[in-house]
Amino acid sequence: MDQRTLYERILNLSSPWQVKDVELNEAGSEVRVHVECDKSVVLCCPQCGQPASRYDSRDRSWRHLDTCQFQTLIVAEVPRVHCKEHGCLTVKVPWAEDKSRYTALFEAYVIRWLKVASINAVSKEMKLSWSAIDGIMNRAVQRGLGKRGAVDSRQLAVDEVSFKKGHDYVTVISNHQGYVLGVEDGKSAESLAAYYRKMNFSERFRIQSISMDMSPSFLKATFEHIENARNKIAFDHFHIAQNLNQALHVTRKDEVRQVDMHLRQQIHRTRYYWLRHRGSLEDKQRAQLNELTPHLSNTALVWFFKEKARDIWKGNRVRGAKAAWQEWIGLAKAAAIPALTVVAKQIEERLWGILNAMKHQVSNGRAEAINSKIRTMRVKAQGYRSKERYKRAIMFHFGGLDLAPTHSN
């Protein structure tokens, strides 16, 4: 097999394309594969597929996978045709997608590396600029979104994740399968509303539950755009537990100021024990908390209510949960501990959403896991200067998209 036939097989060429010549530049560590289009073959309009007359041709080149240690370029004079309906258009080449300077096989190779390595590492290894990599990622995401079709949006989860230090966020919408369905700027009502507007009526109608924190902005957007939202919004138990832990922390800090100095160091050492549930405490740790309880009575009481709330969430069926929560709220208010009272009133106001979460058996667990991975991605990339690149990277890594170029299969 000669070298021209070899590259024709590698590039999977067929009429009217063929390899004209293979040029080796040892000094420049480069291989140039010259491809030509048979001038005797009638070409068609790339838009309508009807036969069209040739207009002219233009020189173009594409980077291909390396041949051994040599960088390889595909070079061709690409014809343009004149279509009576669509005007002058460039014909499509079988080895690359439109507007790309890289062959489909090369882009597929870069995409596979981007899945497991940082942009900086891929840039150095492939000798590509960050802009070039961003272009490959952008085409991959757009291609994946175009091929994705209908998605399962029956159980949605909404959360925000920071773009960089400060109050700059994006809103991430995911489903129960753990795929990111959309990323919108900010964390306002308009951020979530922008995603809802992209959904058609049947997609919005099929929604069974939307897990979220108690953010007023997310609630506003959902009530405005989702029918029967009050029966679909589910408040995640993670955020309730977080609020109770914060109440516990505030109460402990208030009480520690009133105890004897010799106890403060011991209280400080056990501060994280109060945040754990009783089943995870060792005997020694439980004994230490029991010893401190007479000195931190309010803290111990808040801890009791935290544990009781966990028992209600984990152990009650929906039918009995409402009564259990109402009893919890009444007792928590009666305890007259300021931080606990705030949480009790919050739970009372949002009890309908808590019961929805229990009814649908949904949580923001997968969304929180995705956000954790997104933060790791941001650190790995050493941050993103452009929010659009950040959003694109989220969809690239966590959108569950088919990113491969068509010609690479």
Image (tube, rainbow, N blue to C red):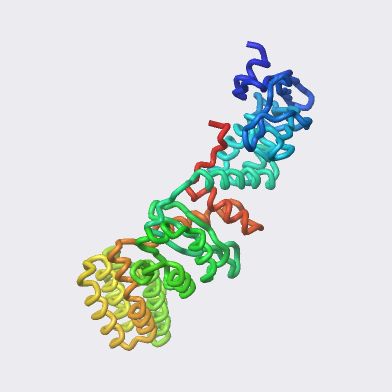
Q: Is residue 235 above or below residue 74?
A: below
Residue depicted at x 56% and y 32%: 408
Q: Nearer the viewer, residue 274 or 398?
A: 398
Q: Where residue 110 appears, x then y in whole percent?
A: 60, 38
Residue depicted at x 48% and y 46%: 148
Q: Where residue 215 appears, x then y in whole percent?
A: 46, 73
Residue depicted at x 38% and y 83%: 342
Q: Where residue 29 appears, x then y in whole percent?
A: 74, 26
Is any atom of residue 130 visible in this view?
Answer: yes
Q: Quadrant of residue 19?
A: top right
Left or right: 362, with 172 as reference point: left
Q: Quadrant of residue 298?
A: bottom left
Query: What is the residue that sits farthest to the front in this orientation?
Result: 84
Q: Is residue 200 above or below residue 248?
A: above
Q: Nearer the viewer, residue 194 or 38?
A: 38
Left or right: 43, with 259 as reference point: right
Query: What is the residue that sits farthest to the top in this orientation?
Result: 1
Is any atom of residue 235 visible in this view?
Answer: no
Q: Nearer the viewer, residue 107 or 189?
A: 189
Q: Is residue 2 above or below residue 93?
A: above
Q: Quadrant of residue 157?
A: bottom left
> Which part of the image, by quadrant, shows the N terminus?
top right
Q: Nearer the viewer, residue 225 or 157?
A: 225
Q: How many marks?
A: 0
Q: Where residue 221 appears, x then y in whole percent?
A: 48, 70
Left or right: 333, with 95 as reference point: left
